[in-house]
Image: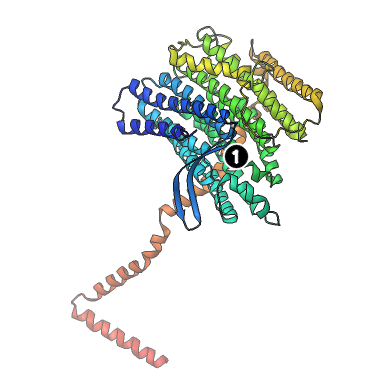
């Protein structure tokens, strides 16, 4: 496990090599460096994972150096490996490697090929720092690193102003969450004198035992940071627009890694949240509301990537729901399986987009199952896992653990929200599949070729089935006590499975065939209203534009004229006016001088008489 630092070093070296090459190297060499560096990190992860299990799953800390030491403020660059960080590290490097392999095919011929891999290598390095950090300060370094890389990758096609605007939107909204996280760091260090996760959990109970409400504020700020990075209510609006980046970016950042950082943050600091049950319950409520709202928004989207984006919001909502009901294991289990099937779906959508000549509107596709059968199979398996089709998909087992955790801990309302979300998920997922791959062919598609296209899809396809559910994260959490017996758990499994199957059948009834019922619903007054409302994602962008953006622009326009500068110019203005008056008085004319002296004398005599 002493090689743990190499999981950061290899991608970082890849970034430096590609950055300093300035795009002069061939695409093959750039791909070899970009893909190879992450592949080496994945191999190191495999090695340290085997070593971790051979040592009885004992947590391990690798001390590298002291980052900063000022008085009592001592921050070290220490990497920690336990079951939680190993699970996340495996997802980041393993799934990240598969996405890099697919990207080497997807990005061929694109301008900035080596720049793309430089950004993604820096992202992987930053994400590994975030995952392995043993203190909040070091985690914050990785947290900001992935935020920077997200901005660079979302705006990768920078020549289009819309892409730049999407990147800026993601950067600004996630920075709001980052400010909250910074406040949490300040509060926790001020109260506990340390930012080490293990030490904070040990010191917090005694320090906050009395009527000290600072821990509530600290955990609330941690939640604020988590909702920003993980695109949860109310900071969820950036994720759909982030689809402006290349599709492998969506798979890497917005499905498998960065957007799950908020889930990881809460899971890593769950000892603090256990001391503030009100904030912990709020975590579950935020997740439940987000998963339902995002599910409705996905129902009416026409862009294939935006459907998956809202689906990502919804699935991360499930993870927040699990955290809120203390089902820690279930949250991380679903994080892992979601990385498998959502990366599969995003990569498959990228293959569809290239096959359809960069067309992303699902209603301009249709009948593609014959021309791209492998991608159709990937969508079926990935969509079934997303919809949690019973027994055969990984998503069923992880989502069922979340619902059972909510039920076992007495959160019936949250469990009900989870079932509603599962119903919506199955409908919008198979709506997308039926529209894209069934019906009349409207566009001629070209199937992708090559091992770099096929292999990542096939591996992720296998992991999205029940095979992926056999991978049990080595977590030391406590599963909720089963007060309902095996019969109660089985009943819940049957209910959740039935909900998924019913949703698929409804989607088949609505979008397979002539779709006359869908047309009638869409053309009705309520149908048009709700379709427009949900298409706009419940109007949060409009609301934030009204409350924040327009007032900010008004203030900016006011400050553009620099009123302070105008105020400081007033004395100079008076001086210039006085100067002009004096210049007029000195004109060299004797009559003017005599008249002015006479007028002055009259004024002086008048003043003396008045006084």
Please report the residue visible at 66 percent of the width from the left and 38 percent of the height from the top: 286
SS of the residue under disc 1: helix
Q: Is residue 382 positioned above or below 477 on the image?
A: above
- How many numbered discs, if any? 1
Please report the residue visible at 30 percent of the width from the left and 25 percent of the height from the top: 25
Q: Which of these two is toward me, 18 or 106?
A: 18
Please report the residue visible at 76 percent of the width from the left and 35 percent of the height from the top: 409
Name the spot of residue 245 as percent of width and height, x first.
Answer: 46, 29
Name the spot of residue 216 as percent of width and height, x first.
Answer: 66, 50
Q: Which of these two is toward me, 527 or 296?
A: 296
Q: Which of these two is toward me, 398 or 245?
A: 398
Tell me if residue 431 can be seen: no
Tell me if residue 121 can be seen: yes
Name the spot of residue 360 as percent of width and height, x first.
Answer: 50, 21
Give the residue furthest to the top.
Answer: 370
Pointer 1: what residue? Answer: 268
Report the quarter where the C terminus lies.
bottom left
Q: Is residue 513 positioned above or below 317 on the image?
A: above
Please report the residue visible at 62 percent of the width from the left and 38 percent of the height from the top: 267
Give the residue furthest to the front.
Answer: 55
**Is residue 117 rendered to the left or right of residue 225?**
left
Colouring chosen for the image of the structure: rainbow
Name the spot of residue 411 as percent of width and height, x first.
Answer: 76, 35
């Amino acid at each position: 496990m002493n090689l743990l630092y190499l999981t950061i070093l290899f991608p970082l070296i890849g970034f430096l090599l590609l950055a300093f090459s300035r795009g002069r190297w061939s695409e093959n060499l750039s791909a070899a460096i970009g893909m190879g560096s992450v592949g080496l990190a994945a191999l190191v992860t495999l090695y340290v994972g085997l070593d971790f299990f051979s040592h009885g799953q004992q947590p391990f800390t690798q001390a590298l150096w002291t980052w900063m030491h000022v008085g009592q403020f001592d921050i070290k660059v220490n990497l920690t490996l336990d079951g939680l960080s190993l699970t996340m590290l495996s997802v980041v490097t393993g799934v990240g490697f598969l996405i890099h392999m697919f990207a080497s095919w997807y990005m061929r011929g694109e301008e900035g090929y080596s720049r793309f891999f430089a950004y993604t290598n820096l992202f992987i390095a930053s994400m590994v720092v975030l995952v392995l950090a043993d203190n909040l300060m070091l985690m914050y370094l990785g947290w900001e690193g992935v935020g920077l890389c997200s901005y660079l990758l979302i705006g990768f096609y920078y020549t289009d102003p819309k892409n730049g605007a999407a990147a800026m939107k993601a950067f600004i909204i996630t920075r709001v969450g980052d400010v909250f996280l910074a406040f949490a760091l300040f509060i926790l260090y001020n109260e506990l004198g340390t930012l080490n996760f293990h030490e904070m959990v040990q010191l917090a109970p005694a320090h906050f035992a009395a009527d000290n409400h600072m821990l509530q504020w600290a955990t609330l700020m941690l939640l604020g940071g988590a909702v920003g990075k993980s695109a949860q209510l109310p900071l969820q609006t950036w994720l759909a627009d982030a689809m402006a980046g290349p599709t492998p970016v969506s798979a890497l950042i917005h499905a498998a890694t960065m957007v799950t950082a908020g889930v990881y943050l809460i899971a890593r600091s769950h000892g603090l949240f256990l001391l503030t049950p009100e904030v912990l319950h709020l975590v579950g409520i935020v997740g439940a509301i987000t998963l339902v709202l995002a599910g409705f928004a996905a129902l009416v989207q026409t862009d294939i990537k935006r459907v998956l984006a809202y689906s990502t919001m919804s699935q991360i909502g499930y993870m927040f729901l699990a955290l809120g009901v203390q089902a820690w294991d279930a949250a991380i289990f679903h994080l892992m399986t979601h990385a498998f099937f959502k990366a599969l779906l995003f990569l498959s959508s990228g293959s569809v987009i290239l096959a359809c000549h960069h067309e992303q509107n699902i209603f301009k596709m249709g009948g593609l199952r014959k021309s791209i059968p492998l991608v159709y199979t990937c969508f079926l398996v990935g969509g079934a896992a997303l919809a949690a089709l019973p027994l055969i998909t990984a998503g069923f087992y992880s989502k069922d653990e979340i619902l059972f955790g909510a039920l076992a801990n007495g959160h019936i309302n949250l469990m009900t929200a989870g079932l509603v979300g599962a119903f919506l998920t199955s409908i919008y997922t198979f709506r997308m599949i039926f529209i894209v791959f069934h019906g009349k062919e409207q566009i001629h598609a070209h199937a992708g070729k090559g091992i770099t296209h096929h292999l990542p899809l096939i591996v992720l396809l296998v992991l999205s089935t029940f095979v992926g559910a056999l991978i049990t994260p080595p977590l030391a959490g406590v599963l909720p006590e089963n007060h309902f017996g095996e019969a109660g758990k089985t009943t819940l499994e049957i209910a959740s499975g039935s909900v998924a199957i019913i949703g698929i059948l409804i989607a088949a009834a609505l979008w397979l065939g002539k779709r006359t019922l869908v047309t009638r619903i869409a053309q009705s007054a309520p149908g048009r209203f709700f379709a427009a409302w949900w298409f706009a994602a419940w109007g949060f962008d409009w609301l934030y534009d009204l409350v924040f953006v327009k007032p900010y622009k008004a203030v900016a326009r006011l400050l553009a004229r620099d009123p302070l500068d105008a105020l400081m110019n007033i004395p100079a203005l008076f001086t210039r006016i006085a100067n002009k008056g004096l210049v007029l008085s000195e004109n060299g004319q004797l009559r003017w001088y005599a008249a002015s002296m006479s007028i002055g004398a009259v004024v002086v005599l008048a003043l003396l008489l008045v006084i």
